[in-house]
Amino acid sequence: MAAPPNLPPPDKLLEMAEQYLKELEKGPWPSHVAEMRKTGYPLHVYGVGLVARKSPWGPSAVKAKRLTGVLARIARDWVPKGGEEVHFRVFHTPGRFLPTSYLRGIIKVAREYGIGLVEVVGQTGAMVINVKSKEVGDAMIEALRQVGTDVGGSGDAIRELNTCVGPALCEFALYDTLKWFTEFRKDKKIHDAIAVPGFPYKFKIKFSGCPMDCGRANRADLGFIGTWKGAPEVDQELLRKKIEAGEADPNDLVSKCAGGAISWDAEKKELKIDGSRCKKCMYCIRKAYPAIKPGKERRVAVLVGGGSKGRYGPKLGWFVGYLKPDEVQKGIELVFKVIEPWDKEAQAKVRIGDYILMTGLYQFIEKAGIQLEDTPKLVEKLPDNVPYRVLPEEERKKYAQFAEELRRAVGI
Amino acid sequence: MSAIQLNIPNELDKFLPDIVKRNYGKWKERKFHGPGIIEHISETGERVFTVKAALPPNARVSVDTLEKFADIADKLGVGALRITIAGNVEFITDSLDKALKIKEELEKLGFPVGGWGGALWGINTCTAFLTCQIAVIDAPSIGKALGDALKPYFTGEEKLPAKLRVFISGCPSGCAGGTAIDIAIVGMWGAPPKIREEVLPLCMPPPKALAKIPESQVFLVQVCPTGALTLRREGEKIKLVLVGEKCINCGRCKDNCDAFDYDPKDVGAAILIGGKMANTGVGPRLARVLIPWIPANPPRYEEIVAVVKKVIDVWKTHGKPGERLADFVERIGWAKFVELVGAPKMAAQYLWWPDAARTYLTYRARGEVIFKGFRDAP
């Protein structure tokens, strides 16, 4: 980008940049500037950007033995003293648990080959580590591999997978998100698709244990959200105890139920939930766990086509069916089923959600060959302009038999 | 190992702390011990305490600080910590005393502890001017300014009706996490981009090829969703033209070519309200534009902070307990909410709630029909 108009002379600019940066170090919230001062990050470039109100970075490239996960920027020519910034996207651990031994390994690499700055979680879910210069890139990748992780997940490939904490620290997890996450990563095809970019645009896969969606799976290109069928289970005895202890309020449960499915029998002291009206909003479960538990018939809802970037802007995913909590392999197969028509037909820089908007959901489901439990089907419209016809005898017999059966069943 | 073969950390056993491994999937209850400390009780009778602290905007941490975190986790925790997607850090320990000590140590280091229940849960920002070349405004400094103003809501000194999260994206690409969140602040170009003719040839096919191929095959023309970018041919001369009225400032051209430039004096931020991801209440939904443009003045961004504080005040005074911002707006109605905030009258296009298309502005692209309503089909 060109230099913004009315930019002060270089000395004045750097001085103003420093003032802006000092201002950002004040205040009770932790400051990114204070953190970056402890590292080798070219802070003056950032400061100049703030003064100029324009991003100070321009595109650059770095030579490393990686196809994805490597990004480089160089300061624009109007930034005094210049500077460069190279960063690598590093895979996070399952559930983003960092044992200190592993963390210290990362710290050592970031110190030795990097500038000592780590973005502990980027918005893709990966960790981002800045590299000292373009030359040490390969050495750092080697060192990271010794620690037990690697660089990857940028560009038009499958990005770093994302998951909520799941059964590791949460009682609401309805399927084993962390196991699904690791199984997906171990799969050879997905592994290759992370390493090599080859799709029209990025593809994100996310896992959430329950409908509260902490993993933000509804926003992913392919999201897996744990849910159940029918009504939540109610342990009446335990619930009565909870109500007596004042931990739960039945009237509150009834009034806040999103689907209006809950009714409270004050005489019998029983809570009833109508499964057909339950919207799986988790309110009663959160308020009265474990007296009210999710139903036993667990499922994983599959959503396709969410995302914030793309031709038609932000959108949430579309439901395309249920998987069972142990059908990990089917989930992995589904990834490539979903990708195939999009990869074949979509233009460059069109995300799968935009592609679905263009083709239509039912056509997309047909093209991808998605056949899951409860996959939405377009009900064919009946030809209402020809309501009657002459029926052959066997068909008439069929209907007569049906009427007879019905008569017997009803008891007339 | 060959260079292309990735070495991804996959083994669950290796990365989960022992106490979590023993109680994996056996949790039955949770309790809160003041802001930022949560206790998980397992069927086996073991208890795990988690302490949550905020990290700087964009989760940028120096290795010195990370080392201090590791020391705390070794000394007082179970030798592991956890990073959340909201850009917070969680320390895991096995007794309340240790948890309180961790809280003390973290506050000494300058990292506020809090963020569960009716509180601010975290502020996500994209990298913007720290690394990004297409950012319009700087998100981390807005995150810092907002964090300073909203810290009492994080640490629990001031209560909120329900969970609140804030996303700040430097441009409409929405890298901070889209707009499905309570309060989203998105950088806006303000005016249509300017084309820098001297850079443009780098993004276009060579002139001889360009003269032969149809307009629809040119990548930059394809990328524009509204057809604001067109090719004009006048005899031998070919020119890329931008129709300002059709431009919706989506930034897709800038994503793909460096030749598109903007004037810093037009730049501002849009503020979007009332999205969420959880299925609670009224269900997941995208946020809606409350303010299409306000100035973004570094380094303290007083205007943005004022609007966010006003929105929170309205929600706090009128919202029922346990009601998230999206549910609150749904209950009282959008018009009433705008009136309570006192925002200026909006252009008609912002009042239409698009089901699937852009939340910033609505439009229909050339020759493309968006079939709405299939979300509700059987």
Image (spheres, rainbow, N blue to C red):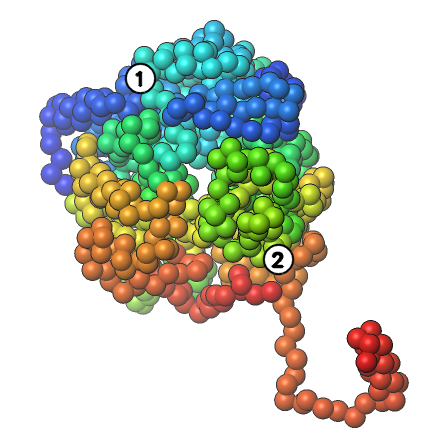
Q: Residue at x 50, y 23 (%)?
A: B39
Q: Secondary structure at mark 2?
A: helix
Kindly identify the amino acid type of the residue bearing the numbered disc 2. Answer: Ser
Question: Which chain is indicated by disc 2?
Answer: A
Residue B5 picture quarter: top right
Q: Is residue A140 above or below residue A175?
A: above
Q: Residue furthest front?
A: A267
Mark closer to the observer (1, 2): 2
Q: Is residue B7 above or below residue A293?
A: above
Front-most of A49 and A136? A49
Residue type (three-letter) at the residue carrying disc 1: Gly
The residue at which mark 2 appears reads as A276
Give the class, few, some or many, for how many residues have Cα within 10 Å of label 2's Cα (few <14, many ≥20).
few
Q: Residues within 10 Å of mark 1 (few under 14, many from 20)?
A: some
Horizontal and vertical percent for residue B253? Answer: 36, 51
Cα distance between the residues tagged 1 and 2: 50 Å
The residue drawn where x is 44% and y is 62% is B216
- Residue B36, above or below A336: above
